[in-house]
Amino acid sequence: MKGTGRRAVQAVTGHKVRSDEHAVSEIVGIALLLAVVVMGVGIVAVTIYSQPMPEKTPQVEILISASNSFVNLTHNGGDPLEEGSFYVLADGTRLADPPTLSGGSWPWSIGEVLQYSVDSAPGQVLVVYDGGGGAVLLKSATISGAAGTAGPDLPARPGGGGGNYTSPTFNTEEELNAWVVDQFVGQLKNNSIYLAQDLKSDNDVWGSMGFFNFTLSDNNTYLEIAQNQNDNPNRYNFTAGDRMGIHLDNSVIRFFAIGHEGWHISASGVTVYKNGQKLTNTTGNKKDYIKGGRIYRYSSFNSSVIITTKGGLQTELYINNTPIISGTWNKQITLTNIKPAEPTLMILDISKNDPNYFLGMVDSIAGYT
């Protein structure tokens, strides 16, 4: 061991160490060995840290439906996805890109629908993320129903995030329906507001002010509008890209919405707009009477609707499935900016001869404390 330092110095410098240089040579030798070790560690560190960091897998909820002609993917929450960062397999066959995007421009975000063309209804659809670091399965769905009549994908799992998820097997249609209802109820428990009042007279009807706006994604949406309740309505059709506005002013209205592909509507005392222009030829303060209609698909929705209840009525209010009011309530309750709850569901029933209901989400509530 004593000669180790001398040999190291002699190998590096070519100088033979004298006996009186032994102490110095031991120190120099150790220093040289440490330098070699430090250099080695540095090389390893540079090698490791120069590698690209693994890419984060996006967390996204996707609803899938299929027919003999199309596979539709609805972004139901989570991270947006860029074009080319994922692909779709139908029964093991990769579907051709690019799909039709309801919003018109990427990235694919919540509420927007991707549509792929197919020759027949698939039995299984996979969505695979391929944005870097290897392929990751975001969603696996088995489409219920026989080929040609494939039913919709089951509701997204509570809690968010993608993953390998195959729907359960059901023996009857009733079992499937019961399971779907349970899924909706489970998700709505922590993301919804329910308000209902029993009316004593027509004077107790809720007040409504504001508007709903939709950008439409196909050519099937229509409204049947008359000027009076007993008149035959005229049918007004909308095309993809049209912007529909429904303005409320103490209106009587019934909305039922489930998913991003079906709003059933009837209303009186409203004003309907198409691309910013009043749809009908009414003059002055005359309002429209929507006798029926349906919004089939839309790429964006926004509202600024304020609902105000009456005091002194039997009232039920639940916030995130927690009972807040159950009994006679003497204050007005104001819901500001009502909108659908997730998974996209909204019921709004303001009528003069029935109880009034609302199920959905709001930006704020006043009057319940």
Image (tube, grey):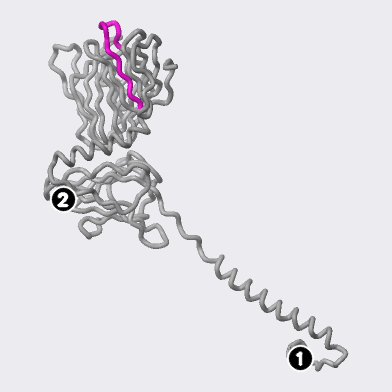
The magenta span reads 193-205
Q: Is mark 2 in CB contact (under 8 Å) with mark 1?
A: no
Q: Nearer the viewer, mark 2 or mark 1?
A: 1
Quarter of the picture containing the N terminus is bottom right
Residue 91 screen position, x and y as percent: 20, 57
Q: Which residue sits at x=63%, y=73%? A: 41
Residue pictured at 18% horizontal, 16% vertical: 226
Return the x and y of residue 18 as percentages of the image width and height.
Answer: 85, 93
- The amino acid at mark 1 is Gly
Give the image quarter of residue 48.
bottom right
* Residue where numbered disc 1 is placed: 3
Would residue 274 appear left or right of 190 to someone viewing this image? left
Instruction: Look at the picture and state if 273 lies above or below 132.
Output: above
Q: CA distance from mark 2 to mark 1?
A: 82 Å
Q: Residues within 10 Å of mark 2 (few under 14, many from 20)?
A: many
Front in this rendered view, residue 245 or 292: 292
Q: Residue 365 at x, y = what percent?
A: 42, 21
**Residue on which the image places disc 2:** 121
Q: Earlier in the sequence, mark 2 or mark 1?
A: 1
Amino acid type at mark 2: Ala
On the image, the x and y values in percent for residue 140 come to: 27, 52
Mark 1 residue crowding within 10 angstroms, few (<14) / some (14–19) / many (20+): few
